[in-house]
Image: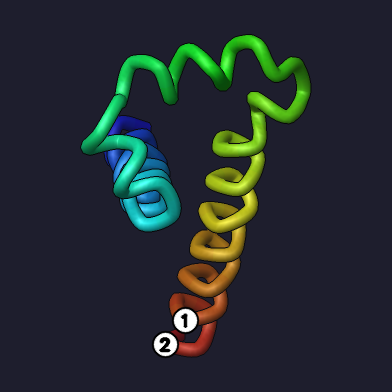
Amino acid sequence: MKKELKIFIAIFLVLALGMHFKECIDHPMEHIESLLTQGWFGLHPLVITLAVYLLFVIIRGIVRFLKR
């Protein structure tokens, strides 16, 4: 479980920095605070991360299945 959480957090950080690098460097706290005021759209980082993580899990499962 810890390993999966680390993978999820790593995917989150890579996606967040990849998409919003300038905002994270210039004004990180304001950027994070703005997510909290956006309602459901403020959850988009977690939703996108979850989608990428599920894709990662599916691919990993297929690879494990084919190795057997």
Q: CA distance from mark 2 to mark 1?
A: 6 Å
Q: Name the residue carrying label 2.
A: 67
- In what quadrant of the picture does the N terminus appear? top left
Q: Is residue 52 left or right of residue 60?
A: right
- In what quadrant of the picture does the C terminus appear? bottom left
* Residue 4 visible in the current orientation: no
Q: Is residue 47 left or right of residue 63?
A: right
* Residue 54 visible in the current orientation: yes
Q: How many marks?
A: 2
Say which residue appears at 44% left-offset and 54% top-offset: 19
| Residue at the farthest front position | 26
- Kind of residue at badge 1: Val
Say which residue appears at 38% left-offset and 50% top-offset: 11
Is 50 in front, or is 41? 41
Task: Sort mark 1 into few (<14), some (14-19) or many (20+) by Cα contacts within 10 Å.
Answer: few
**The quadrant where residue 55 appears:** bottom right
Q: Which label sits on residue 13?
A: none
Q: Secondary structure at mark 1?
A: helix
Q: Name the residue carrying label 1.
A: 63
Tag 2 near tag 1, CB within 8 Å: yes
Say which residue appears at 54% left-offset and 18% top-offset: 34
